[in-house]
Image: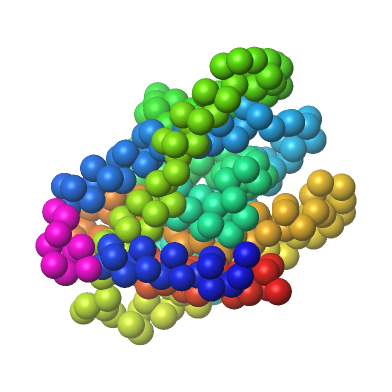
């Protein structure tokens, strides 16, 4: 596969999303419907299909543990860095941790390496999602004056279709049920159905992201601060993650694992952050900051693709 074959579809689908917004070809309700379709059906089914055919080893539990620690611990590292630069905005540290894997990471990974190789990336995302729906959301709500109960955290986790798809696939894999299905007469039928449903996932995700990108009226000076501080923190996190994987060796030092970790780390902050901010002005600012960082993530993905495919 050439570099152009990887990059061009990403650029084209983002542009199509932007055109759909500017020409009013799709309403906001329509784009939210497409997002719901992906997050509730096509992506979870794709991940379930990938995992139930995969061989899951016991030591791969390190992947979710690592990215739970990176995501949750990143909040506290972010707070320390904010104190060093005397940043008073209580929401600022939350831009420095967390990764938009659901609405961007899976799409980019699938385009570069194919969804059949996505196991390590998805295992990392399990830990990340758990940290988002427990520590991250609870702390964002807390600084905004509200509190998340344990019940709300559990409900958030159990009602996340992507996580359900991954966990169900893992259960099928480790119990041998997935292998039995794969080798049965029903295997090719189920596989064909899952592949058909999953096929448009990456394209639809990129159209949704392109639609939501806004670059008008941006406070470039403050957003530059967000970008620089997040980049500094992600360098710190990358050094920690890659040092751990180097020490562990084996599957953790494989090229596929390292690429998966790089894709995760270059992703923008979670798109859900503005949803938990009450102040309209700050909500708009952080939405713009995430949009700008998303473009930087796309550029980072292009550079990574050039290295991987050379």
**Colour scheme of this structure image?**
rainbow
**Rendered residue at 38%/58% (across/down):** 206
Q: Is residue 81 shown above or below 151? A: below
Q: Count the marks: how many?
A: 0
Question: x, y percentage for residue 60?
Answer: 74, 37
**In the image: residue 22, left or right of residue 83:** left
Position of 102 relative to 176 (above/below): below
Residue 123 lies in the magenta-colored region: no
Relative placement, left or right, of 52 versus 155 is right
- In the rendering, at what x and y percent does residue 59 appear? 79, 35
Which residue occupies 59% across, 50% down? 114
Q: Position of residue 72 (x, y in %)?
A: 56, 48
Residue at left 59%, top 21%?
A: 187
Residue 93 drawn above or below residue 34: below
Pick whichever, 57 or 91, lies toward us. Answer: 57
Viewer-nearest residue: 190 or 69: 190
Image location (x, y in percent) of residue 232: 58, 73
Query: What's drawn in magenta, residue-wise?
Result: 19-27
Apparent side of residue 238 relative to residue 142 in the rendered image (left or right): right
């Amino acid at each position: 596969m050439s570099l152009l074959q990887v990059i061009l579809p990403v650029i084209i689908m983002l542009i199509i999303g932007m055109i759909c917004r500017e020409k009013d070809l799709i309403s906001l309700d329509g784009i939210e419907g497409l997002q719901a379709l992906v997050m509730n059906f096509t992506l979870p089914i794709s991940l379930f299909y990938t995992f139930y055919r995969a061989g899951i080893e016991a030591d791969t539990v390190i992947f979710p543990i690592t990215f739970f620690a990176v995501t949750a611990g990143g909040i506290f590292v972010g707070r320390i860095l904010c104190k060093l630069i005397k940043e008073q905005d209580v929401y600022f540290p939350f831009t420095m941790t967390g990764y938009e894997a659901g609405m961007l990471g899976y799409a980019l990974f699938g385009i570069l390496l194919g969804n059949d190789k996505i196991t390590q990336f998805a295992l990392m995302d399990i830990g990340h999602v758990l940290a988002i729906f427990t520590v991250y959301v609870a702390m964002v709500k807390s600084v905004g004056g509200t509190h998340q109960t344990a019940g709300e955290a559990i409900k958030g986790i159990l009602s996340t279709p992507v996580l359900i798809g991954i966990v169900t696939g893992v259960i099928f894999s480790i119990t041998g049920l997935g292998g039995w299905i794969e080798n049965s007469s029903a295997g090719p039928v189920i596989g064909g159905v899952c592949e058909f449903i999953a096929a448009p996932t990456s394209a639809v995700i990129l159209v949704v992201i392109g639609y939501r990108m806004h670059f008008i009226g941006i406070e470039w000076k403050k957003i530059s601060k967000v970008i620089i501080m997040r980049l500094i923190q992600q360098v710190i996190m990358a050094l920690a993650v890659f040092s751990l994987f180097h020490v562990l060796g084996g599957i953790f030092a494989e090229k596929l694992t390292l690429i998966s970790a790089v894709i995760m780390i270059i992703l923008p902050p979670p798109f859900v952050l503005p949803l938990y901010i009450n102040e309209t002005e700050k909500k708009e600012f952080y939405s713009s900051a995430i949009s700008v960082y998303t473009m930087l993530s796309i550029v980072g993905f292009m550079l990574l693709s050039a290295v991987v495919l050379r």
